[in-house]
Amino acid sequence: MTAETQAALSLRGVRKSFGPVIAVAGIDLDIAAGKICGLIGPNGSGKSTLFDCCTGLVRPTAGQVLAGTTDITGWEMARIAREERLLRSFQKAVVFRALTAEENLILAGQMTAFRSLAATFSLGPLAHRRVQALRARAGELLERVGLAHMRHSKAGEMSFGQQKLLQFASMLMPEPRTILLDEPFAGINPVLIERIVENIRAVNREQGVTFVIVEHNIDVLSDLSHRLVVLSRGSILADGNPEDVIRDPRVVEAYLAG
Amino acid sequence: MPGIAIGGRYAAPQVAGGVLIAACLVLFPLVASSYQLSTLIVSMVFLLPAIGLNLILGYTGMLSLAQMGFFGVGGYTSALIAMHFGTPFWLNFVAACLVPALLAAPLAIPALRLRHTSFVMCTIAFVFIIESVSKNWVGLTRGDMGLSSVPRPRIGLWSDGFIVHTTVQYYYLGLLLCALAVAALVAIVRSPAGRYMIAIREDEILAASVGGRTWHYRLAAFVLSAAFAGAGGSYYVHYVTVISPTVFDPSYTNTVLVVVLGGGVGTIAGPILGSVVFVALSEALRIAPELRMVVYGLVLTTSVFAFPKGLIAPLTSALRGAVQPKARGPHDR
Amino acid sequence: MLQNLFTDGLVIGSVYALVSVGMTVILGVLGQINFAHGEYYMAGAFAAWWAIDRLGLSYMASIPLTILIVGILSLAIGYAVMQRLVDVSFDAGIIATLGVSLLLQNTATLIFGGTYQIFDGGWLEPMRVFGEDIAQQRVLIFLVTLVVFGALEWLVRKSTFGKQMRAVSQNVECCHVLGVDVRRVVLITFILGTTLAALSGVMTAPITINIYGAMGEAITLKSFAVIVMGGMGSIGGTLVAGWVLGIMESLVAAYVGLQFRDAVAFALLVMVLMWRPSGFFSTKARY
């Protein structure tokens, strides 16, 4: 059971301030590999900024971010995705609207199929075979999330819920290790929420992918997660079993007051 | 949309249409007057930098107004090499693609830090700086006088070969170069790198989140667009056999913009159509330059609101309707 | 000699500032760069030339008429084009205004001919200022610029319309909620900005003497350099940046070579963009 004790993602004293505003006030956190960890907190508690720090969108003011044992502090987002297979979703920007569903997935899979920059410019038979392999895998994944019938539809023409499903499928393309989801259930109907939840569980169970999920829908999240972390004003307020955490009086107060 | 169908195969009607148009263009000199051919040569001169602009604006989403600067650099390079070393055309042409590309790389380092309006302004400034160099480096460029009696293109492997001099020969040379350029654009756009470029156009941060080295692909688009522009400069300078700093006049930049946007930005066929309609046709109709520019102005402004996808969009949808009016199976869009 | 260069640069710089500040307020409110801005400067010069040469009016009388003509022109273009640019991407805005620029520039060439026209007007007698002989027109340009900038600062900071301008520049969606008529604010700001360019054109024509259809092009491009240096949206910054550019140009023309004068703006532009992408006097820099 070494895999359980190893951390997929570790934060060591991560701080982020924007001028005088402190968004993340020194957080230490280890996310165990192969687990689903929920992250909740009132608006402005630093959840999104924490994601940004982990995935290289912003550079922490202080502290370290480790993926496994690799120090990824200060890496660019694209490098973290390529080399550590640490992927994230965004609340608003979901998919590439001008591309078809299938092309969205192929694009997401390119980071593993084409390692070097030069390889991406090649059009030879090898490159063609790799793209064909990605296309086949894209077909399987679309099947899996129930979007096979929309394979050749432009992503921009799909409903928001379908786009979120597509986004989820595209994150599975490069054989991810860790996935950070930013409000995956916001703004979509309960049927699709259920479908995404099932897929998260299945991917976690079958492939051992670690998930960190920011979400306001606490009922769904506490049911799905192995562990729940509560942020408030840039610090960890509570951490532990979902059932215990949501009964914690400090958490209840932070939510009612916040 | 032809340009977006990356990776997948082109549909049969698209291929058939392309072959048909190509055949017409190849056979055109049999029926055309030399005046008509020379107007098409002018449109091919503008098509080459337009293909570069299409790559950077249409597929990568960066508006660069530096195309005619690199066009001029390509033209000067090609002319100077031919004049000093008597080299064959293919060598001049390759140098005319490489030198602007090599110049674009260091210019891109500061420019790529900028986005939106600042990037556009920076590219405008590049043209003026290049123009200023061409005016003041008299020893090389002969300043405002420019270079004259540039050799005509010599088609041969090294020391001999035949000299292109009739309009028909220039026409076929242009056709060959444009075909190569279009093929290169298709190859770039349909490669995995092209997919990343389109991703950057759509959303740069999202493109980085799927592992795209966004800076590198923006650099590649800038450098490649400069190479396309340089190719146009080489063809141009060996056709008109003179070049001077007037090549950097903003009106030429505007023409390239009209070709791309009026034709259809982000599509393969759009700028080709645009170069024929907005350059050759307006020349052939003998529209006075001022009147033509007034028309260009109207085209640019209305294209933003009325037909943002250019002339090609209604044309392709009409063709699609004519070719496949029935049989809308589940796999059609 | 040096003092002369400074006063020359200051006057030319005032012209740049006067044109550019119009572009800056339009940029601030609309979030779009007006590539046709120099064309209103050109239109101002031509309207005044027409009033003097064809209608036989005095230079003094031609100024309000010019403002009126260009005001009507920009009202039409504001309705047809600028108001629609509120929620359009920046590159679409550049292309649309570039189209307007081509339209105006070449229409002027069609009407007034492709050659230079001689502008005959203005007050060109020298007057003594600080022991130097300077044409009255130049002194006037400098003074008018100071007055205009003072008035603009007051307008933006103190007046009700200025508050609306700032509201639109900060958040268009909020304006819809608060009942600020965004399209009206955009239109009025556009007319204000373009008539300032026209005023600059009519004030400068007596000095430049030659006027022609494409004269606005160089002014547009220099205005880019000025507004970037001025911090894109700062009124005071624009004035200082205009002066800096004017003085630098006249120094370079005298000590480096006349042929390098026009490159100064672009060299400065690139340097400023490299060094501080948001300009010397960046305030909020909406772009």
Image: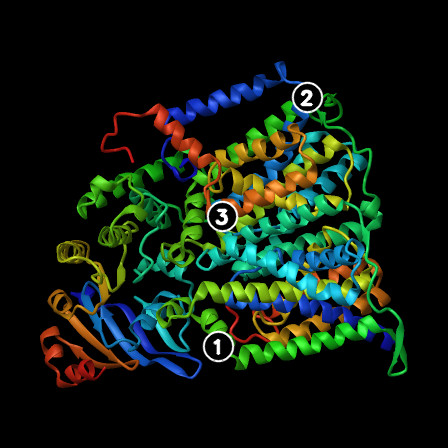
Residue C69 percent across, percent down from the top left: 65, 58
Instruction: Verify CB contact (< 8 Å) between mark 2 and mark 3.
Output: no
In front: label 2 or label 3? 3
Residue B294 percent across, percent down from the top left: 63, 43
Q: Residue at x 64, y 59 (%)?
A: C70
- For the residues tagged 3 and 1, is the chain the same? no
Quadrant position of residue B290: top right
Chain of the residue on which disc 1 is drawn: C
Chain of the residue on which disc 2 is drawn: B
**What crowding class fits label 3: few (fewer than 14 Cα within 10 Å), some (14-19), or many (20 or more)?**
many
Q: Which mark is residue B304?
A: 3
- For the residues tagged 2 and 3, is the chain the same? yes
Q: Which residue is mark 2?
A: B169
Q: Is residue B250 visible?
A: no
Instruction: Verify CB contact (< 8 Å) between mark 3 and mark 1.
Output: no
Q: Which mark is residue C163?
A: 1
Amino acid under disc 2 = Gln
Q: Which mark is residue B97?
A: none
Amino acid under disc 3 = Val
Q: Which quarter of the rendering shows the C terminus of chain B?
A: top left
User: Which element is circle 1 on?
Assistant: helix
Above or below, comparing residue B269 to residue B103 in the picture: above
**What crowding class fits label 2: few (fewer than 14 Cα within 10 Å), some (14-19), or many (20 or more)?**
few
Instruction: Give the distance between the C-alpha atoms of the residues marked 2 and 3, in whole angstroms.
Output: 38 Å
Q: Is residue C192 visible?
A: yes
Which color scheme is applied?
A: rainbow
In front: label 3 or label 1? 1
Left or right: residue A217 compared with residue C119:
left
Instruction: Give the distance between the C-alpha atoms of the residues marked 2 and 1, in whole angstroms.
Output: 65 Å
User: Which element is circle 3 on?
Assistant: helix
User: Which element is circle 2 on?
Assistant: helix
